Amino acid sequence: MTGHCNAPILGLFGAKDTVVQVASVQAFGASLERLRKSHVIHIYPEAEHAFANPTGRTYDAQVADDAWQITLDFLARNLVDAASESTD
């Protein structure tokens, strides 16, 4: 599935998610490692599915804020890298 993807991959998950379970996230991370894909996988121990959706019942503001900061850092790091590669 990810064999042809050359972009860095960010995954932010909740350990209490019953839709995307931790075992699936761990298998995904292992696949990315095996394929030598650049990635960041973070599992929030107390978060449920859709933890960043402020209109949902499982919204967790603290986790969502942290995930947003990780996302911004990830994009800043990887978009800058991609931009410099395209101008070389």
Image: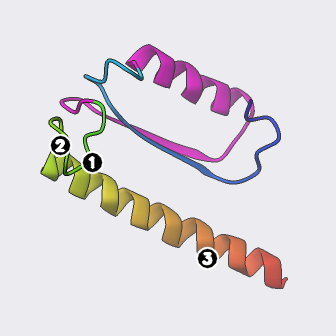
Label 3 crowding class (10 Å Cα cut-off): few <14, some 14-19, many 20+?
A: few
Indicate which label's residue lies in the foreground, 3 or 1: 1
Residue 48 screen position, x and y as percent: 24, 30
Q: Residue at x 74, y 29 (%)?
A: 1
CA separation, marks 3 and 1? 25 Å
Q: Is residue 18 left or right of residue 31?
A: left
Q: Is residue 61 left or right of residue 26?
A: left
Label 2 crowding class (10 Å Cα cut-off): few <14, some 14-19, many 20+?
A: some
Up-down: is 36 above or below 69? above
Closest to the observer: 79 or 1?
A: 1
Q: Residue at x 82, y 41 (%)?
A: 4
Residue 45 screen position, x and y as percent: 23, 29
Q: Which mark is residue 59?
A: 2
Q: Is residue 33 left or right of residue 40?
A: right
CA separation, marks 1 and 2? 6 Å
| Mark 3 residue element | helix
| Mark 1 residue element | loop
Closest to the observer: 60 or 76?
A: 60
Residue at image mark 3 = 80
Residue at the top extreme of this rendering? 23
Question: What is the number of callouts on the image?
Answer: 3
Name the amino acid, label 3: Val
Is residue 40 rendered magenta in the image?
A: yes
Residue at image mark 1 = 52
Magenta stretch? 21-48
